[in-house]
Each structure stands twice: as structure tokens, then as C-alpha cells.
Amino acid sequence: MRIGIDFDNTIVKYDNLFKEVALKEGFIKENWNGNGKTGLRNHLRSQPNGEKTWMKVQGLVYGKYMHGAGMMPGVASFLFSCKERNHRVCIISHKTEYGHYDTEKISLRREALKWMENKHFFDPEHFNIHKEDIYFAGTREEKVRKIAQLDCHFFIDDLPEVFEEANFPSDTKKILFGDSSGEKLSRDTAVLDSWKGISDIIFGQTTDDDIISGSRWVTDQLIENLQRIPGRGNSKVYKLTTTGGNSYAVKYYPDQTSDKRPRLKTEFNTLKLLHQHHITNVPKAVEKDEKLNLGFYEWMKGEPVTAPTPDDLNKAIDFIKKLQLLSREIGENDIQLASEACLSAYDLSHQIEERLRRLQKVSLDSQNTSIFLNDAFIPLLQQVRDESICLWPEESRIRDLPRDKQTLSPSDFGFHNCLKASDGSMTFLDFDYFGWDDPVKLMADFIWHPAMNLRSALREKWKTAMLRLFACDTYFEERLNAAMPLYGLRWALIVLNEFLPELAQKRRDAHGLKEYDLERRQRIQLKKAKQYCDQVKNTVSQYTFG
């Protein structure tokens, strides 16, 4: 099969490069606070001689500064899949030889080829694309003629105008990469906003062979076996064994187009940081490839903890103590906020409202879900939120909790993310949400997480330990009492993620399409959400409410 692909803004991601170049070349001032390529284009065009200025910036970005551009998330995995399946890739770009008003006469085509060379496009061990399959066209009409001449089975482009050309070949399947809102497209044009989605349409689900192909490039080792590890909620995890006898945990992260969080980078850097500070009951970070979204980690032996004991809880508490000490040692460092950090009552309330809004958009498809949200959840939220905010300490009711009261948090911490070895030692896993957060959220999520199911004695032991550990925070317990019911309601919405199409797709990707029954999962999760609301009502009476 022959697959044709556009180049600029389809394979290449210019991201903030346009703004950086415009700033460097003096076309905008440092205080310009616009965003994205479109915002910059509109701003420059509104100035005297603006169209000429914009064309100059384009020429500089596609020429002199081309080396600063990155690859679109997921495109590397797609190209590896093409190689694995022996499909021929042809890159067909509408690109003139030189940029407009370029006094240096830098060849845009030559810079594009250099960029591809640097990204290993022509490396037989990498993407293995042939240089003779790279085509540059001076006009859109010429580009479409080349697509027809090559008899491409598919063509992928970010510009709908290409597909609307009168001579676009009728036998070539059209895939528009990006957002089609506001565009009138022919019915035979598939619109996909991610390379993962494009790959699924053309090839189906990611296979073990795809992971092996990418792993060979990253590790440069011969692979003897790849075994899928079941039970991961968002990422696919494998045990990879090399012919030399080394074993690694290979983690294939969700596509960054649908999940903007740099989960691979966060987890890899976090594990390196923890080992540097002698926190060793976590895996070692071995290697990563951000283009392929693959991380390689030390393989840890052990079994899941399904029935935690008081000793298991002590080990979890000791781990949090280490993180709390590390928080005091390193200061702010370059660590970002934890995923969905809640640093104020406003943050927590806003997150609940945003989750509710997203569910209300889709719940019309499920009458039972709509009834639950309108008749059970929303009235309870209104009662709990008003009382919580009244009880919340003023220090962090609206403003962020001061940094010296925050802690480093895995943000998904619990026995569902650890392994217990035969000698009783425990290894803690999954740090792709790691960062600064309110320790109250860490404490509450440990109890509320649906995979925990702690006995009441262990819950009390955990609460007592956290109150002691964070006793230097005068308002910790007061904030905890105010926040606890709200976190329960937050989890009532989190378990309904299966009703959100984009998050349900992530679950399918992680589990594998054949083994994922969406309707069954939705029924189970709705039942859990109702149980959370019942638990919140009990929690209200346990804390300082009512």
C-alpha cells in the first residue's frame, strides 16, 4: 500500500516556533501575549505591510529556523507502523524553492530534507523512507497531480483545500488531519485530530510487533520476548526480555494529541530524581523516546497488593514521609504542579464543575446517567460545596496554598500502583502525574480511590499518620475536614469517565479493543458513582458538617 502524507503542519509541528522567530527577528515585542500561529498571523496582518511581514516570517520558519521544529505527536509511531507492514510512504509537500522576501536565498526544500535527515527519516533501521519518495510541488495543482501519478491509496493533509481540488484522484482516500469545524467537506473525507486516530483507521489497534519495532530502535538490543501486562487503566505496559537476558518494563503512553500532559517526560524525570535522592523503592528509569511515546524502566518483581495489611500501610506512609522530606530539600526546583493539582477550594470546586459540564454534554445519550446527575449528584454537590467553602480556611479558599505547605505527590498513589515482593518489600509505580500539590489531596485520594477499598482501621491509621506528618501546617486538619466530601464527589465523576468518548477511547487503547466491553463498563461505573454519593452523605456526618 502507498500512503501519501503532507509535510508542514501534518508531519512537522511548529508549535511556538513562529512566535520565537517573530520575536528573534524583531517583528513582535517581548510583551506580545498572543498565542499560536493563527494569533500571530492575525496580529501581523493587522499591521502596516502586514501581509508582507507574515510571508517573511513564514519563509524564516520554513527555512533558516526549520531545525527548531518538532514532530507531530504520534507521527513517529505511525511511520514505524508503515515500515513494520511494508507500506510505502510518500511525502508530497506544496513548498516553493525559496521563501518570500528571503534575501539570504535559503532553500526551503533543502532545509526540509535536512530536517528529515536529522529525524532519521531515511535511516533503514528507523523509518526507512526513501529519498526518492519525497516530492516538492510549486503549486497545489502540481501537488494533486503528483498524488494522482503516484496512485496513493491514502493521502493525509491538514488543508481541506487540497481535497477540494477538481483533479484530486477519486480512488485516493482522503484523511484530513486536524479540526474541520467551519469547513464544508465532501462526505468521503475522514477527519481525525490525532495520528493515533489515523493509525487506527488505516492499520487498526497498535500491535505487539509495533512495540517491538519501536523498542529495537530505542534500546538497540535484540528482543527475545514481549509480554503484555494486563490491568493498566490508561497506558499499555509490557515486559520486554532481550536475548542478553535483560528485562524491562516498557510503557506505551496515551497519545499526546488527546492528552496534552507530558506523562512520559514527567515519569521518567521523576524516577531519576527519586533515585538521585536515594529513594530506591521505585523502578529505575532506563531509556525513553518521546517521539514514539515509549518509556523503558527497570523490571520489578512482585505481586499486586489486593488485601493490604497494617505493615503494607506503614510502608506507604514511610514513602510519603520520604517525599515530604524531599519537598523540603529541593524547594521549587523545575518540578511542575501535579496533574489536576488542587491548591485551593476554588481549584477543587472548579474541577468538579468542569467534569460535570463535560458529562452533561454527553449524558443525553444515557437517560440513567442524566437522571443520576440531575436528581442525585447536583443537589448533593450544591449542599456539600456551600458548607465546604464556609469551613475552608481563608488562607487557601481562593488563593493557592503557599508553596512551603505543598508537597511532592505521585497524584495517583495507592496499593493499586505498587508491587509486593516475596520478602515483603514494596515497589511503588506510576509517576506520570507527579508534581507539587496540597497534601490534603494526597491524603483524600488515597482513601477515596476506587481501587483501594481500605478497611476502616487502615483508613483511620492513614489519617492519623498524615495529620502527624503535616502537623506543621496549622490548617491541615481544618482543610481536610472541609475538602473530604468534595473529593468524594470528584471521584463520583471520575468513575464516569467511560461516558466521555475521548477517555473511553484511551481505555480501549490500553485494554485492547476485543477485551473492552464499553456498555458493561458504563453500567458498572454508574453504580460506583451512586455508591460514592451515598458515601459522601456518610462522610458529611463524620466530619464537621451539619
Image (tube, rainbow, N blue to C red):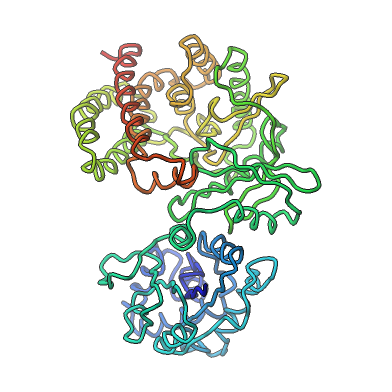
- Residue 387 appears in which quarter of the rendering? top left
Residue 545, percent from left and from top: 29, 15
- Image-based side of 525 in relation to 437, left or right: left
Residue 155, percent from left and from top: 44, 74
- Residue 395 appears in which quarter of the rendering? top left
Residue 52, percent from left and from top: 39, 85
Q: Which residue is drawn at 46% across and 68% down?
A: 19
Q: In this view, does 338 lie above or below 92?
A: above
Q: Residue at x 38, y 22 (%)?
A: 484
Q: In this view, does 438 lie above or below 102?
A: above
For this rendering, which residue is in front, 397 or 144?
144
Residue farthest to the right?
244
Q: Which residue is drawn at 50% across and 67% down?
A: 13
For this rendering, which residue is in front, 391 or 238?
238
For this rendering, which residue is in front, 545 or 49?
545
Q: In this view, does 146 lie above or below 340?
A: below
Residue 33, percent from left and from top: 39, 62
Q: Residue at x 63, y 68 (%)?
A: 127
Tell me the quarter of the image containing the C terminus. Answer: top left
